[in-house]
Image (cartoon, coloured by chain):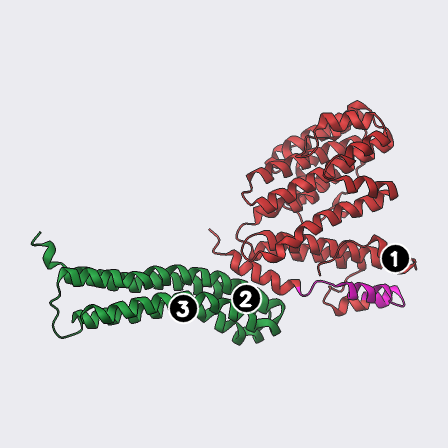
Chain colours: A green, B red
Amino acid sequence: MEFFMTMGQFFAILGVALAVVLPCIGSSIGVGKTSEAAAAVVIDDPGKFSKLLILQLLPGTQGLYGLVIGVMIMLNIGILGGNSNISTIEGLSFLLASLPIAFGGWLSAIYQGNVAVSGVSIVAKKPNESSKAVISATLVEFYALLSFISSFLLVINILK
Amino acid sequence: MKQKSYAFAVASVRTNEIKLLSFADMEQLLMAKSYEDALTSLKARGFSENDEGGLLKDEMGKVWEYIKEIAPDETIFYPFIIKNDFHNLKACIKSSVTKIEPEKYFLSPSVFDPFKIKEGVQNKNFDLLPKELQECAHEAYDLLIRTMDGQLVDVLIDSYMLCFMLNKANEIENDFVKSLIFDICDLTNLKIALRCTKLGKNMDFLNRALIDSPTFTKEELIKNSLAGLSQFLSYIRESKFSGAAQAFEVSMSNFEKWCDNYCLEKLEAAKFIFMGPEPIVAYLLYKEAEIKNLRIVLSGVQNKLDPDAIREKLRRLYV
């Protein structure tokens, strides 16, 4: 029990790891799939590259959101300098605060990747309608943003 | 392991779909002042500069090479190509009796090398053939030597082809592709049965020619075929292919057009699928239909047929 009570920093770092790793996995899957599809279009029509680039980038934002939350937790627990003595309850709180972006970011990046792949087909067949493809992919981004905001608000309020 | 994905393959197919000919393009060809003008117009659209037959023949070969290049697993498309291999086998087996070189009858694209088939059949060493064709080749060769009946050999080989397609379909996990192959097998079985009924073929012949396909049992097909054409058409009317009976009443070519359009219509659903083999299958079959249409239009223009008569024969296009 005494050992458990000294594990605050461990739980907080676990939160950092989840906040960064899961959305990055999702983003790499999403960006990877979209880029493969975009490459197939660019082989035949290099002129469509700029229109496809936005679709390729969109599933990558979740990884960034995760990193921001991870850095914020690191700053709060003093791992980047300052007092790093936090209680187990605080450490667990940081772990729980990281979960919205960890899971929301991970899954939304994969699904956004699927929408972006469909969007690549729109750009391939009807380049003038590419904005509709971007809007569709952006709709999924909304849910990644909700996850990010939840984690953000939780993290900044834990040590208050 | 091939490092390819359906995301890449489908996006690539979508880029190429826009190059498929539209109704307007077909109309333009139909209105060509001469056959030469129609050929020039086609060449301007990127068709290779050969004679007309070669020009269109090359096109399907190119499509198959392209699909092999982009698809993560090309074996899923074998059932749509294998008919050419069985056709090549027919040519080789018949040439072993007629002593006519079979090369000029070879169709491409094919899954197996037709020259390997030729070598195996000419040397009567059927082990040299791909294992999928060995049993069929052996039986067809024996039948031809015994009966000298080319038509019987044709239907025997066709029945093996349908069995191959059905077995392959059962291995495929994709429901769309599986159901499409089932429909193609059903319709091919139906076509054979209708031809046999029209020609009044006997029980032995029907027994060799027909198979159990997903919708029609061999027993039912034979029973209704032996009962005559009108009974056979009533039997079809009760199946899910009721439109086929109506089309047949107009003409055999109308029936064949109906069968092609039935499958092409089914492919429309592939437009809404962005990851999977469906859009690739759709592209392959629509390209095949496009080439069929071009043959109809070019031969119509060459023979100065009425454009309306040509239009009636055209298959559904990818819109």
| Residue that badge 3 annotates | A60
Q: Earlier in the sequence, mark 3 or mark 2?
A: 3
Q: Which residues are magenta?
A: B18-39
- x and y percentages locating residue A124 in the rendered image: 59, 68
Q: Which residue is mark 1?
A: B300
Pinpoint the chain carrying mark 1: B
Q: Are marks 3 and 2 in contact (CB under 8 Å)?
A: no
What quarter of the picture does the C terminus of chain B occupy?
Answer: bottom right
Q: Alpha carbon of mark 3 to alpha carbon of mark 1: how far?
A: 55 Å
Rendered residue at 85%/68% (across/down) = B37
Q: Amino acid at mark 2?
A: Val
- Asked if marks 3 and 2 fall on the same chain, the answer is yes
Say which residue label 2 marks: A120
Res. B230 image quadrant = top right
Q: Callout 1, which amino acid?
A: Gly
Image vertical order of residue B131 relative to residue B318, above or below: above
SS at mark 2 in the image? helix
Question: From the viewer's perspective, is residue B221 above or below residue B295?
Answer: above
